[in-house]
Image (tube, rainbow, N blue to C red):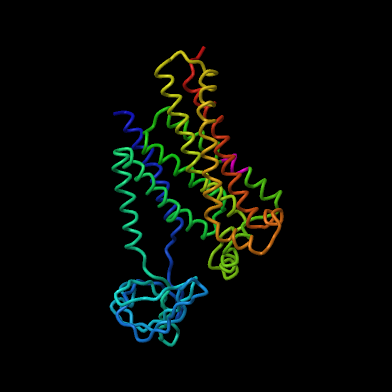
Amino acid sequence: MKKHLISAAVLLTVLAVCAGLFVAAHPAREPEPGAAEYMEYENAVVEQILSDSTEADPVSENHHRGSQNLIVLVKTGCYAGEKMMAENTVGPIYGQPLRVGDGVTVGLSTYADGTVRCYVYEYNRFWGLLTVAAVFLIVTVLVGGKVGIKSLVSLGLTVAALIFILLPLLLAGWPTIPTTFLISVLVTAATFVILGGVDRKTVCACLGTLAGIALATLFGLLAQYILRIDGYRQEYAEALLQLRQTGESGIGITGLVTAGVIVSALGAVMDVAMSISSAIQELTRVNENLTARELMKSGMNIGRDMVGTMTNTLILAILGSGLTLIVYIYSLGLQPWQLLSSAYMSLEAVSAVASSIGVMLAVPLTAAICAYVFGKKT
């Protein structure tokens, strides 16, 4: 009972801190005096197709080009219930032909003279995503049972922390790397408390995770300095820079590469740290007389088996996510060493290597912490 009360107290503390950060990231906004023009995005449904000039383009593997003029029924916002004429621009890399009944997200530009321009921003994929997520939830619960349910709760908390706390804080101008690291600390603590409660194993895993992430962060910063790259060489950096220039956001773009390293490495480092902590705890239950040196050696042996596959997984996942751009850069006819020297490949290398270093160094760090905590004191 005492263990569960401590776990609940820790989890509530973490949630309270997250709630405080959420409030800090979402200050109340008063409407600007005299503001007559504004932009908003709302949900709508296609009710009628007035014209359709889209046609298949053989060059783009029969993806459509052209435009549609539609009548849409706005479902949300101050224009909810109103029917508006909307334009849907279609191309191979943006938009798609729509049919009556399709859900869409529309952009609504309200001008000073009271006129409103409506256009289709994107097809509404909410219900499709909900279906995919439902399949994932069902499989996780069927296979994982109670542990699977706990993992889903921790996953939901992690996603919520990243989307609803980290991103708004970064856009509000909070320092990029410290803020990302702080959110990672909260996510780590909450996840381990949900999965295993508060005990020595959880504490060791948490400390090992944070140590591994901290070293990955330091290596990421060092690699950025050596390779002379930072967040300004990433895709969409120009758009974020425009937000800074217009005063709409104070986001620190420079540190986004290292912040990405922290986020991408967090899950793998947590996995390694918890696996080693759990294994060492089980060893001490079988033999309480194991010394710290023996436990350290066992932890290292367990960790080495995990490092190879985990590192491979990280690097392939990062490179796979950017495969389209890699293919494009390769198509330019660059030599292999020139390809590797491109800013994009350097950014991917920093992310992959720094994340992998975090995983690898989490092994001896977690093993050493567990050996000290669980080892027989002589």
Position of residue 12 in the picture relative to residue 265 (left or right)? left
Residue occupying the far bottom of the picture:
113
Against 77, residue 375 (above or below) is above
Relative to residue 313, is residue 342 depicted above or below? below
- Is residue 151 visible to us here? yes
Q: What quarter of the picture does the N terminus occupy? A: top left
Front residue of 164 and 97 = 97
Q: Quadrant of residue 118?
A: bottom left
Choose top left, top right, bottom left or bottom right for residue 164.
bottom left
Labels in figure, total: 0
Q: Position of residue 309 (x, y in %)?
A: 52, 38
Answer with left or right where residue 219 lies relative to residue 314. Answer: right
Which is the main secondary structure of the residues drawn in magenta?
helix
Please say whether residue 226 is one of the residues in the magenta stretch: no
Residue 34 in view: no
In this picture, residue 366 sits left or right of residue 329:
left
40 vs 371, nearest the viewer: 371
Residue lying farthest front? 58
Q: Quadrant of residue 339?
A: bottom right
Range of the magenta residues? 214-218
Q: Is residue 124 above or below residue 362?
A: below
Query: In the rendering, at what x and y percent does residue 83 appear?
Result: 31, 82
Residue appearing at x 58%, y 35% in the figure = 361
Above/below status of 330 relative to 369: below
Counting from the top left corner in percent of width and height, residue 93 is at 50, 70
Q: Nearer the viewer, residue 372 or 148?
A: 148
| Residue in the image at 44% along x and 26% along y | 279
For this rendering, which residue is in front, 32 or 230?
Answer: 230
Residue at (52, 57) in percent of width and height: 170
